Image (cartoon, helix red, strand yellow):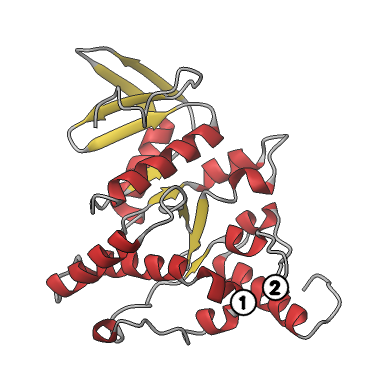
Amino acid sequence: MRKQDPLLQNSTSDMEFAIFSDSIIMYGSDFQDLLFRLSNLISWVNSFGILFRGGVGYGNHFSEISDKNYLIVSEGLVQAATIEQKIAIYPRIVIHKSVLNAILSIKDINYFTISHYLVQGQDNLWFINPFFLNPDISEIYDFAHKSIIKHTGKAFQDKYIWLFDICEYFGMKYLIRENPEAYYSGKFITKNADLVEIVNKNLFFYPQMYSQFIIGNQFNYNINLSVYERTYDDNVADIKYQHNRIKNKLPSSLP
């Protein structure tokens, strides 16, 4: 990837980039633009079967970049590097808590501004939706399946299992929307017989899956920005609660 790549360039954005070796540093003040570009980036590299891990940080930043020199002193970069090395673990771009707090503090922010971009894992971490701009994930799904078999018994097999699990999650999203209890209790079993004992270890919560209003579908949920301040368990409990009330045609109320 070159810095001139259309994926990275936008004359109306204040986003800047530093690319060296196998690393890409992206920085700017427009959170929505950053989330959009990161969604583009991870969707693009995933489509080539390249596992990509990273982090997003927030804080004071100074940089001076030329054709000959890279000088970056940044609190956000320290946070992002720590996430990439010690926290992300799987092929995902994890958002630091300070970033999420900064986004939620923006005066005109609303749920639908960010709902497409973020997914929550069982470890309570929010990360960039890897499939937002890549609705056809069949090739990634197949790549993950083959890689799990190929790397059986190796320590890094878990990374492919994670990738397979999130492919399954997005592939079953309409079924999960109508029966979240089954998914979150582990009753959804992969159709791939050779992986039944291996996969479905990682579960996810993608708010936009539930907040999308579908005409003629009884399971339309009430989702707002508060989901980004709650734990994974609390978010799952709320979805189960709402599902039960809708299924049993009970009046809406807060749990």
The residue lying furthest to the front in this view is: 216
Marks 1 and 2, the one that precedes in the sequence: 1
Count residues near mark 2 (Cα–Cα under 10 Å), then give few for <14, some for 14-19, many for 20+: many
Count residues near mark 1 (Cα–Cα under 10 Å), then give few for <14, some for 14-19, many for 20+: some
Q: Nearer the viewer, residue 74 or 217?
A: 217
As displayed, is residue 88 above or below residue 3? below
Asked if marks 1 and 2 touch (Cβ < 8 Å), the reply is: yes
Pinpoint residue 20: horizontal percent, then vertical percent. Answer: 21, 29
Q: Nearer the viewer, residue 94 or 79?
A: 94
Q: Is residue 23 visible?
A: yes
Q: Nearer the viewer, residue 172 or 195?
A: 172
Judging by the rendered image, the residue that carries numbered circle 2 is: 219
Residue at screen point 86% across, 77% down: 251
What amino acid is at disc 2? Phe
On the rendered structure, is 35 left or right of 241? left
Q: Is residue 151 visible?
A: no
Q: Quadrant of the C terminus?
A: bottom right
Q: Secondary structure at mark 1?
A: helix
Pinpoint residue 114: horizontal percent, then vertical percent. Answer: 59, 46
Residue at screen point 36% across, 37% down: 78
Judging by the rendered image, the residue that carries numbered circle 1 is: 178
What amino acid is at disc 1? Glu
Q: Secondary structure at mark 2?
A: loop
